Amino acid sequence: MADSKVGKTFEQIREKIDRGDVVILTAQEICDRVRKGEIPTLHDIDVVTTATSALMSGTFAVLSFKVSEPDTFTKAARVWINGVPAQVGPCPNERIGILDLIVFGTEQSVSDPGYGAGDLFRDLVAGNKVKVKIETDEGQNLTCFTTLKQIPHAMLHASRNAFKNYLAFVNPGKASISTIFHSDKMKGNYEEMTFCGCGELNPLKNDPELKTIGMGTKVLINGAQGFVTGPGTRSSADHPNLSGVADMHQMKPEFMGGFKTGHGHDIITTWAVAIPVLDMDMLTHILKTDDDIPLKVVDVRSRKPIFEITYGDVWNKNTENGVETDNRVEFNWKTCLKCDDCPVEKSCPVKAVHSDPDGNVVHFDRSKCFNCGLCVSICKGNSFLSNMSSIELDGVEHKVPVTLRQSNRATALKAAQDLKKQIQKGVFKITKPVGKISFPD
Ligand code: SF4
Ligand code: SF4
């Protein structure tokens, strides 16, 4: 009988995939087994599929496409797509009628404050027509329309993505404040908590020593096969993150979009990463569940840590009514009061809720909903349902309710499941890194 502690090589795991006898589990499937008291061994798992779906500000698109016949204008000086400003360059565009553009994921439309670059990227990936407005260096104004199919080069780049989990935020002050960590004002006196991070599903939590994630590792970014290109900006040993790139033509809109915060637009991006389980050290990390993963609670004003809880407190906890926290949010239209000025429609950070102009029906777009949970606390009819957590913090007299999640674990799980199926079908080939990533201490 083989020793259950002896590791495997990349090549051996790839051979098992080719033979069709590989064991692939999502990180959640493994952690569910651990919660039931099982202790999986190296024999029981060959590959774990992990994922994270969250606001990832360090995301930008590089687009290159034809906007006119040559010599129609000399140079584009400023460009907007659906009102979202694009940086012209880095390549010159003199007289050729082709533009190279960079669009930052945090940009906001100049014509619609509710529309940002994340919405634009989702519209492009969904095949929607977008309006391109050009101001030339000679003061001409040109307009044209395009779709992603007519944009031959459309690559999404990640300069700071897939953090190894993140932080929770509270406001100990008296006054409410606006912040990127809330979509409205964050109330003071510890009245609420927001957080980011997918806990046990997170790629870097499952391979923190970066034995299988490195430069050139193939990943899924918004459902498209892409690659890790190196460490992300501001990476540190405590808060590592990754950079990467993928082709927008292969992406799926359900994994991406815009998200309005209290301090401007942010962008939703989803990564899925396959981790071959090579040795016992790796397995030890993989078997850690939400309860074993620390989550620092910081003062949103200073970002100083003031408490420490775990991801088990926010994702996997029995709530007061004896039910586990929900990853998803559901809408019960039967209890909707059809309020005159629906606060959910006003505040939903992804615009998943709309009322009819006559106010008779409230529509909930399930495919757009990020499951952030903000609507659960602000809906007047309690029509949005999700068991969100309430946290006890030392010295705070009341339990602090989680009111907003800036990570979407339901979508991350879907991404991890999709990746598992793609490896099983041979559509996604796991790759060995071509270079090692290290993070400064
Ligand atoms: S606040 Fe809630 S109950 Fe009122 S209209 Fe909006 S969804 Fe319906
Ligand atoms: S959970 Fe509610 S507030 Fe959040 S995205 Fe979905 S509908 Fe909007």
Image (spheres, rainbow, N blue to C red):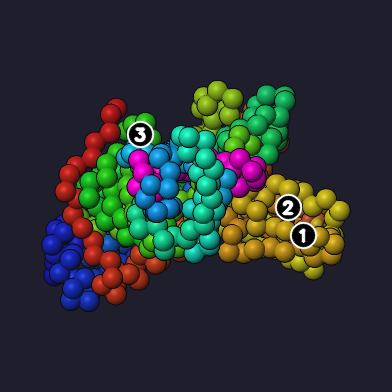
Indicate the position of residue 350 as horizontal and vertical percent values.
61, 52
Residue at 45% of width from left, 63% of height from top?
A: 252
- The residue nearer to you, when weighing 60 against 349, is 60
Amino acid on which the number 2 mark rests in the picture: Glu
Range drawn in magenta: 94-115
Quick check: is the Cβ at mark 1 less than 8 Å away from ligand 1? yes
Q: Main secondary structure of the magenta part?
A: loop
Label 2 close to label 1 by CB (< 8 Å):
yes
Spatial CA span between label 3 and label 1 = 41 Å
Q: Secondary structure at mark 1?
A: strand
**Which residue matches tag 1?**
355
Rendered view: 92 above or below 146? above
Residue pushed farthest front? 71
**Which residue matches tag 3?**
233
Indicate the position of residue 93 as horizontal and vertical percent values.
35, 42
Disc 3 residue crowd, few under 14, some 14–19, many 20+, Cα 10 Å: some
**Which residue matches tag 2?**
345
In the image, is residue 101 part of the stretch drawn in magenta? yes
Spatial CA span between label 2 and label 1 = 7 Å
Badge 3 or badge 1: first in the primary sequence: 3
> Left or right: 269 with respect to 340?
left
Amino acid on which the number 3 mark rests in the picture: Thr
Q: Quadrant of residue 84?
A: top right
Question: Looking at the figure, which quarter contains the C terminus?
Answer: top left
| Residue 364 seen in this snapshot | yes
Label 3 close to label 1 by CB (< 8 Å):
no
